[in-house]
Amino acid sequence: MYLISVYFDNAATKRIQTLIEQIAAASGNHYMTDKQVPPHLTISAIEARSVDVLFPAVQQLNGRLRQGSIQFVTVGQLFPYVLYTMPVLNAYLQDLALQVGSAVSGIPETAVSKYYHPRSWLPHVTLGKTLSKEQMRLAFAVVQDKFSVFHAQVTALGLAKVNPHEDVLWYELLP
């Protein structure tokens, strides 16, 4: 599995990372911190034999995509194990997903995850993963106390391997 994700300005990244660390400390679940998963929003998740088949499609987007503003407004759960924060799916984010989706559609011997099709997608940033019921309860208590609405500037796009997270390609988006 490979991910095409966007990354955020320093202030938003720090804010999300702080939530991830507070959740890990309160819940005892250190998956996100131990795996050094950076704050990111996955635009597309793709099964492929090799990252080499995805690299040209993602690289050709370099210099064509722009930075944009999004607003994180809520937290939620993907039952039974994931806690996330979610932005409003605004026109910028929808357009970004369509452009990425168009770039990777039709690559032979690949399959986009059914959860990451451009028009059938729940944009989110994972704050905690592999949480037990008790860890989820403790994690949710953290976000109830610490989360508030915030803006983020999408500043970069990357292609990464998973388990463990490893950036393969990363670049800044146009201002």
Image (cartoon, rainbow, N blue to C red):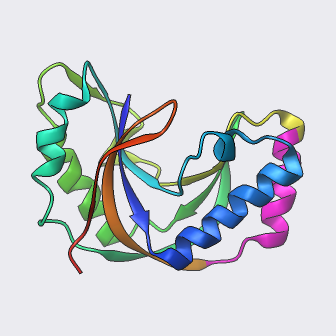
Q: Is residue 119 left or right of residue 138?
A: left
In the image, residue 108 lies in the stretch drawn in magenta:
no
Magenta segment: 135-149
Residue 121 in picture, x, y percent from top left: 41, 47
Q: Nearer the viewer, residue 144 or 31?
A: 31
> What is the magenta segment's predominant secondary structure?
helix
**Vertical arrangement, residue 40 with respect to residue 117, above or below:** below
Q: Residue at x 54, y 55 (%)?
A: 125
**Vertical arrangement, residue 114 with respect to residue 126, above or below:** above
- Report how many numbered discs are placed on residues in the image: 0
Q: Residue at x 15, y 60 (%)?
A: 62
* Quarter of the figure with the N terminus: top left
The reply to whether residue 102 is visible in this rendering is no
Residue 105 in picture, x, y percent from top left: 16, 37
Q: Is residue 7 left or right of residue 130?
A: left
Residue 81 in picture, x, y percent from top left: 70, 35
Q: Quadrant of residue 51?
A: top left
